[in-house]
Image (cartoon, rainbow, N blue to C red):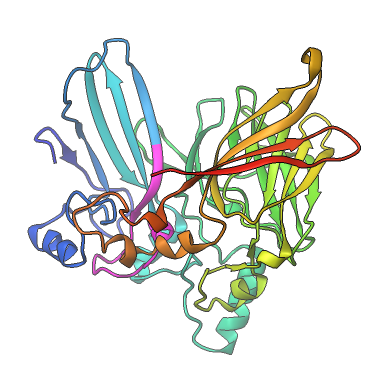
Amino acid sequence: MPATATATARRNRARPAKATTRPQEAAAARDGCTELSAWTSVRQERWEGELPVQGRLPDWLSGTYLRSGPGLWDADGGGGAFHYLFDGYATLVRVSFRQGRATGAHRLIESDAYVSAVESGGPVLLEFSQCPKPGNMLDRVSNAVGILSGAALTDNPNAGVLPLGDGRVLCLTESTKSSVLVDPETLATVGKFRYADGLGGMMMMIQSGHPIVTESELLKVLPDLARPGHLVVRMAAGSDKREVIGRVDCRGGPTPGWMHSFAVTENYVVVPEMPLRYSASRLLKGEPAPYYAFEWLPASGSYMHVMCRSTGKTVASVEVPPFMAIHYINAYEERGEDDGPAAAVIVDCCEHYGDPAIIETLALHRLRSFRDQDVLPDARYHTMYMHMVVALWQPMHQLLLSSRVTVS
């Protein structure tokens, strides 16, 4: 910790703040981690201080960057409560630049999932890879009802930070109930964000982990587990109400594909449907499975759906080679002759060799096995860059190009 840093206690009195001790650092090292590793828990629940700068920051660089992500994998400090990267309780991080200086801060987000885990000594809600074990048949029934209603799902907002356009800042993950407001200055948890609409409910309690923010609105996709498909919605800047743009029905599989992120162009929303699909039975049972709440069904097909942002109409739906993409990094339109309407939509994504091995790779014991390394050296884990061109012209929509390039 830099000499100018300060650590303070959090508001929740369930557990006092504590700094990392030498024995804890040694324990982390025994787990295959070092103080330079990204896979160790953040022990200080709140920290703020000046950051050392190598070189010189330009005078014009002024502003604040906010980010959330997994920061604590054991709520009781004893280690080993969680075993998967995405399970970690959310930590909000702020880096500010002003007059050639950089200051940093982080603070654990006080979600219900985190607070209840601290109080009970372990996870209480359903996380990405872990579900509390039911003790008897009544517990199983209660757990199933809670999952169907969304009440048993985590509200741990460790996926993204979004400005709402009116000064409010929202953190969230893939459960709708995970929408949590935070103070961008103090990083304090303000409270739950309540949507002022009737969307959601039974079997539609999931959302894309990375919505798209434009100057005028926020776009997100809601997977529908009851009627397999995806609802594309928008929320105007400063509003609390989501409005439906349109719906895309699934072309393959019994359930929608995993929807961590998606792509948007000036006029279109690109909704991916990949063969890593939500498994209703695995969600309800809460039992260990190779891909957690998902199942890999390559025979169900892979598709790209293109929806018009203004009309909500699906203008193209094409089958593509089997793919496994968590993040989409770019999308744009290719104009026709004489700068006419868009003739094609181009989508770029981080793709993982057309199989779900990346899901297993992100288990903490695998990540921690790379002692003293902050990158994954094994070529099998490298991400590929996938470039797809989807034609929009009638009467035939087709995939004009699909290319993969290994990124080392």
Depicted 251 relative to depicted 407: above or below: below
Question: Is residue 206 rendered to the left or right of residue 396?
Answer: left
> Which percent across, then down, holds residue 126?
51, 67
Depicted 50 relative to depicted 175: above or below: above
Question: Is residue 6 rendered to the left or right of residue 117?
Answer: left
| Residue 82 located within the stretch drawn in magenta | yes
Q: Is residue 242 visible?
A: no
Q: Image point 23% across, 52% down: which residue?
A: 373
> Which percent across, then down, holds residue 289?
52, 75
Q: Image point 14% across, 62% down: which residue?
A: 24
Depicted 362 relative to depicted 94: above or below: below
- The region drawn magenta spans 67-88
Residue 331 lies in quadrant: top right
Residue 380 lies in quadrant: bottom left
Depicted 163 relative to depicted 15: above or below: above
Q: Image point 15% across, 62% down: which residue?
A: 29
> Which percent across, then down, holds residue 224?
73, 57
- Number of callouts in the render? 0
Q: Nearer the viewer, residue 388 or 267?
A: 388
Question: Is residue 190 rendered to the left or right of residue 197?
Answer: left
| Residue 328 located within the stretch drawn in magenta | no
Q: Image point 15% across, 36% down: which residue?
A: 5
Q: Nearer the viewer, residue 247 or 320?
A: 320
Which residue is outermost to the bottom? Answer: 136
Question: Is residue 192 rendered to the left or right of residue 76?
Answer: right
Q: Is residue 34 visible?
A: yes
Quadrant occupied by the N terminus: top left
Q: Nearer the viewer, residue 230 or 369?
A: 369
